[in-house]
Amino acid sequence: MLKILMLFFVFVFCEVVLNSLASCLFFFNLEVFLFLAFTVLKKKNYKVKNYQINFVRLDLLKKKKKKKFYYNLKKGMEVLINSEASVHSSSLPVVLSPTLVVVVEDACDSEKFDFTEFETAKYELDLSHLDKATEEWSELLEVTEEHNSEKLLKIYDSIKVTSEQLEMWAGYGDTTRALTDEASTRKKLATVIEYAESNPSVSVKTKNRLRVITKLLMEQSLSLSLSSSSLSSSSSSYDPSGILLLLAAHGNVCNVQKEIGIQSAYGLVTNNLSQVIEQQSVENSILRMLKEYRRLLVEELYKTFQATNNIHSIALMNNELSDTIGVDPIDDTNIRSWGLPFHWKVDLDRKYFTQFYTVDHICLFLNAMLREKKLSFSKVIQQMEHFFNLTLVTPFASTSSSSSSSSSYHHRYRYAFLSHAVDSSTGDIRPQYWCWLLRFLHIVQFCTADDLVEKRRSCVQCFFFL
């Protein structure tokens, strides 16, 4: 009886202490208390430098919670934070929170996990990835005659378009309105549909993209009426009127503008299709995004010449570089060099690869794709783990320890690697670790003494003669 009373008073005392500390340390909670209490009871010496973190010891968790932990670590990991902690003889040195994973290293392992040489490695582009084929989302989302884009007119007739919505679309030079009334807007939308479905010069890709838009708008309309759709749980809802008006705003103009309208609408409806994102491999997702990124960078390169902002001259520059940078040429019968200087073609490819499509810019772009959830964070981490396991111990790590071949060592080293890979303040993957992953995908390589631009020129010439 006396022991029970003593335990009760200890519990009350701990609760009082916890409440008092909580007013000073707003991050302090029961999990932290259990973590520290376990430390005191086991007479371990922990030195935790991070704050605003929830700590849970795996050896305090029940069996079911351990399974949930490993599931969250595998599927729901958003941010890895490296907590510099001194832990003596700790088993399973991992700490969990639903979106924050903290790797606590054993003090005696700190010298084994030296990433200095790894983090100072120098990388450059591996231009062979420019010629790799990528799988379009329009190829993953099967479309047939059932999704003929002429059905967009029926969807347009079923929605209500307000005058305020029409006023949002400015015409050429922002001096007029692109859309004036519902009837003329419908006619403009019809010209885009006719171009995609009937024009003999249109590409299969463009035709399928407009059909993907039709398919998704039809399925969303069906899900709203029946509350059931194959994509209803995995895709974001989008305003059909906004998509249709975007297409119509690019109607009754040149075919290049129609292509831009279809491409823009396609990007809007497919950007957050988590179902499709999860189906694609990390390699295909990255290659597809980088191909689109290269196309957009042509416009950034064009701006440096301070030429007239005209889509036909941008198309001219795109087609001049298309073979070199691995993008599709634009079918434009009105190509002209509006305001471009006489010497604009001189070393154009070198300027592109040295100032725009660089290793640093690729890393920044991929982190932006992660933040916008166009690239699956969990799948990227899984891919890094996969390549890490293939290499067992990376060539940058010291293998002097006699326990380096043990599973325990590799377990701790893997989590130390992942904790270094992600910036704790932003959640971005650090550039050096992006490069480590991209090297396995043959997108970057270790620096060489070769002139990459000259090699690429020779490669393109060989393809031309073949």
Image (cartoon, helix red, strand yellow):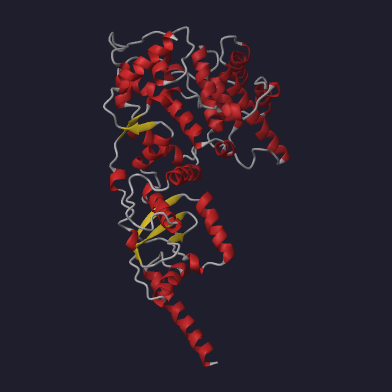
Q: Quadrant of residue 121?
A: top left
Q: Is residue 303 visible?
A: no
Query: Residue reaching furthest left?
Result: 449
Residue visible at 34% across and 53% down in the picture: 113
Residue 379 locus on image (x, y percent): 50, 43
Nearer to us in this view, 131 or 376: 131
Nearer to us in this view, 252 or 146: 146
Q: Quadrant of residue 322?
A: top left
Residue 44 locus on image (x, y percent): 37, 72
Q: Is residue 429 above or below residue 416?
A: above
Q: Is residue 22 left or right of residue 1?
A: left
Residue 262 locus on image (x, y percent): 54, 22
Residue visible at 64% across and 30% down in the picture: 217
Q: Quadrant of residue 238?
A: top right
Query: Residue reaching furthest front?
Result: 402
Residue 411 locus on image (x, y percent): 44, 55
Q: Is residue 338 visible?
A: yes
Q: Is residue 371 above or below residue 181?
A: below
Q: Is residue 286 left or right of residue 277?
A: left
Nearer to us in this view, 183 or 17: 17
